[in-house]
Image: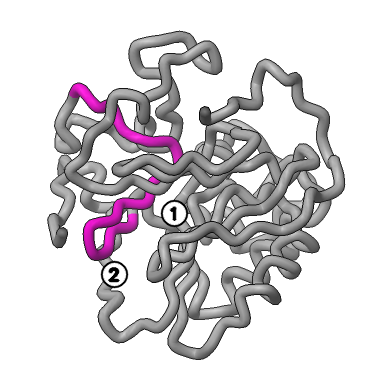
């Protein structure tokens, strides 16, 4: 499938299309949340070559112990790209001003696309409303989508009713294992909450994960979803 997502002008201004034909391995990685150590371990297991590509689903920062380290790692490697998560958006909008924020960090977060597409894939942080066309979605909705016709972590979750046409890779909603559906792949497996950091190997259709990580922030069981 080679369908190109079509967005409203507001979102399209923050939509990046990638050509992966000349790339080697392609990975999509879940929410890192300042957990640089876990990210370094995951990248080491991937054994990246110069032609490989890693796309992050956003929320590189906040909650974990080393947000600047994660930013430096991703910014410093042209093979690593990311969409903007709601935690980057909070900094861009001035809703939070963490003490680790450095000159240039806010501008970097603002430069991150809200959506990245390639092949038949669409990478956003939150998700999409299955009952509405992409053209009707706002930037904020793509960043925070979880249960558009439900109640947050009580669901029903957007991906339960989504049947394409794009295969959407997302984070934001914490799961105790990756979500793997025909048209939706969820990759936030609670790295900062003592879970794993997960990558999806796009070429080989398989997940790669770290061992469970250090718990940097506690989270109620009611806010960790079992995808089954």
Q: Secondary structure at mark 1?
A: loop
Q: Let me know if residue 11 appears in the view.
A: yes
User: Relative to residue 26, is residue 104 depicted above or below?
Assistant: above
Q: Mark 2 and mark 1: span between their CA atoms?
A: 12 Å
Q: In which quarter of the view is residue 111 placed?
A: bottom left
Q: Which residues are magenta?
A: 116-131
Instruction: Tell me what residue is drawn at x 14 percent, y 61 percent.
Output: 2
Say which label, 2 or 1, has the lower sequence index: 2
Instruction: Choose between 179 and 194: the one closer to the eye.
Output: 179
Viewed as shown, does residue 222 lie left or right of 54? Answer: right
Q: Is residue 147 above or below residue 201?
A: above
Query: Mark 2 packing: few (<14 Cα in 10 Å), some, or many (20+)?
Result: few
Residue 18, disc:
2
What colour-coding does the image apply?
Answer: one colour
- When asked about the image quadrant of residue 121, the answer is bottom left
Which numbered marker is on residue 83?
A: 1
Magenta stretch, main secondary structure class: loop
Measuring from the top left, give residue 6's x and y in whole percent: 14, 47
């Amino acid at each position: 499938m080679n369908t190109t997502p079509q967005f409203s002008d507001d979102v399209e201004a923050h939509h990046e299309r990638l050509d992966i034909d000349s790339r080697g391995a392609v990975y999509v990685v879940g929410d890192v949340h300042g957990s640089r150590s876990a990210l370094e371990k995951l990248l080491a297991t991937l054994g990246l070559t110069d032609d490989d590509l890693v796309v992050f689903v956003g929320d590189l920062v906040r909650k974990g112990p080393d947000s600047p380290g994660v930013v430096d790692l991703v910014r410093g490697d042209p093979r690593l790209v990311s969409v903007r998560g709601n935690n980057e958006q909070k900094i861009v909008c001035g809703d939070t001003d963490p003490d680790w924020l450095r000159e240039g960090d806010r501008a970097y977060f603002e430069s991150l696309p809200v959506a990245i597409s390639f092949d038949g894939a669409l990478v956003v942080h939150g998700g999409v409303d299955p009952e509405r066309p992409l053209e009707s979605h706002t930037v904020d909705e793509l960043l925070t989508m979880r249960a558009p016709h439900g109640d947050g972590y009580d669901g029903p979750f957007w991906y339960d009713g989504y049947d394409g046409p794009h295969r959407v890779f997302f984070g934001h909603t914490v799961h105790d294992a990756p979500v793997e559906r025909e048209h939706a792949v969820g990759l936030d497996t609670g790295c900062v909450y003592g879970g794993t950091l997960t990558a999806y190997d796009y070429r080989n259709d398989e997940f790669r994960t770290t061992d469970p990580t250090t718990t940097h922030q506690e989270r109620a069981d009611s806010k960790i979803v079992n995808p089954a």
